[in-house]
Amino acid sequence: MPESSLPKSLSAQGLRAAFSGPMDAGIAGFVASTETDRHLLDADLRGSLAHVAMLEACGVVSPEQAGRLRAGLDQIRAEGLALDPDYEDVHMNVERRLEELIGEDARLLHTARSRNDQVALDLRLYVRDCEAALRAALSDLTAALLDKAEAHADTVMPGYTHLQRAQPVSLAHVLLAYQAAFARDAERLRQPLISPLGAGALAGTAVPIDPLLTARLLNADGAFSNALDAVTDRDFAAAFVFACALLAVHLSQLAETLILWCSREFDFIRLPDELTTGSSLMPQKKNPDCLELVRGRAGQCIGELVNLLTTLKGLPVGYNRDLQETKPPVARVAETVLASVRVCALAIQRMTVRREAMRQAASDEKLYATDLVERLVAQGVPFRTAYAAIGNIARHGVPFSQVSADEWAALGLSVTPETFTPEQSIAGRASHGGVSPARIADQIAAARAARREDLP
Ligand code: ARG
């Protein structure tokens, strides 16, 4: 094609070379993805820089052209770019701006690439960045939980099942349960990065490119194996949103626990003024609104998972514009859970523990029934027989402390007031993962070792 017949402006021709007129303004606004795409700008530029390097290495563009493309892309990266919805998405906005900056060479950038593989890459890079940010925030939260656990290995409290007092535990034991859940969440936020760039629109390209090189330049863990799958696959987005939704569920559970604990009914912890909100009417109120919002926003995250999966479920293989709608759920859950993780870390760091109130609640004698059963078991009484014998006493409503030494002796037990102290009860439960101080120390040491291994 002679130079003069090339379209002069990408802004007019980039997407509509075969059209006789512009898109209806209402339709243009409807199809644009610039609102969410602002999150993808840096990823888009990194992808383009890798693409240019690959095109140069394959001899598709000259080193001079590559240099000019790189300079323009770097400039956009440094300056940022306000995305104009008239240019549909981040990809076309970047191309337009690049043409403003470097002129005709900008037209080389889209060689052997489609927006279909480009957006798939951008979203993958963005998800990887979000995973890193969330893992860092989770690391602060798990550190706070471990520190508090270490400080409260001998702070005793009732452990609950069905929200009924069950057996004495330490506060450390409860905090470590949450720590374990968040450590699993952090592991789920570590997906391999598979580069889809170079898949083209759906079927590869006749231009001699090297998508494996692009993948290496992007520090990816691999490249796509099938071009059609590369542009269709949003599994990583679904897995990310699921990981965030489950994390949000865990955060909500922690929030609910802390909310209960700071109610006067439990009164196990207090939150400092800087983390609580007041009432417009009742001057005495200090409310844990931030934790209530952590709990409340978990619903949004679960909703986004359903949103995303529902978007995907009806799609035939290949790029369909519905896939544009997979981006907002990713951005929204990432933002929501990141803020919630930070709130929970602050609450754990700054809460005041009311040891006496916890100990008082753990002194409820009924919590020691299982200890008595296990002492009989240790003497060779079959479990179910021992369970019935202690249950029989509990059924008659006589407090354990009022059962006489003779009656205990008849059962083969020597019971002293010590039997009903939380410290003694806890020290006895030294099985793997149990609540005894030695097992708690093991758990803390193992969790700290896992964190050290995790460091880059
Ligand atoms: N804005 C689109 C998205 O976010 C980019 C891909 C558009 N591709 C296409 N063939 N219309 O998914």
Image: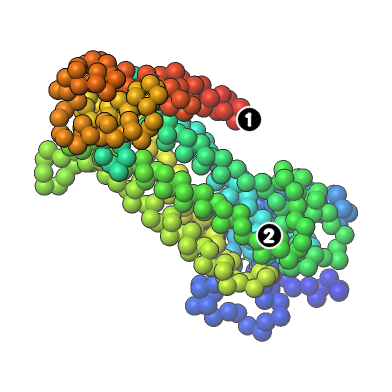
Q: State whether residue 398 is above or below residue 118.
A: above
Residue under label 1, please give it.
456
Q: State whether residue 107 is above or below residue 20.
A: above
Whichever of labels 1 and 2 marks the residue nearer the N terminus, that label is 2
Pick the front one: 419 or 182:
419
**Disc 2 residue lies near ligand 1 with CB under 8 A:** yes
Residue 318: mark in rendering: none
In this rendering, the label closer to the viewer, 1 or 2? 1
> Residue at left 71%, top 61%?
230
Q: Where is residue 240 in the image (x, y as percent from the top left)?
A: 55, 51
Secondary structure under tag 2 reads helix
Which amino acid type is shown beneath numbered disc 1?
Pro
How many numbered callouts? 2
> Residue at left 27%, top 23%?
411
Q: Quadrant of residue 61?
A: bottom right
Dividing the image into four equal quarters, which quarter contains ligand 1? Answer: bottom right
Q: Is residue 284 visible in the rendered structure shown here?
A: yes
Which amino acid type is shown beneath numbered disc 2?
Gln
Secondary structure under tag 1 reads loop
> Residue at left 77%, top 57%?
225
> Residue at left 56%, top 44%?
188
Residue under label 2, please give it.
118
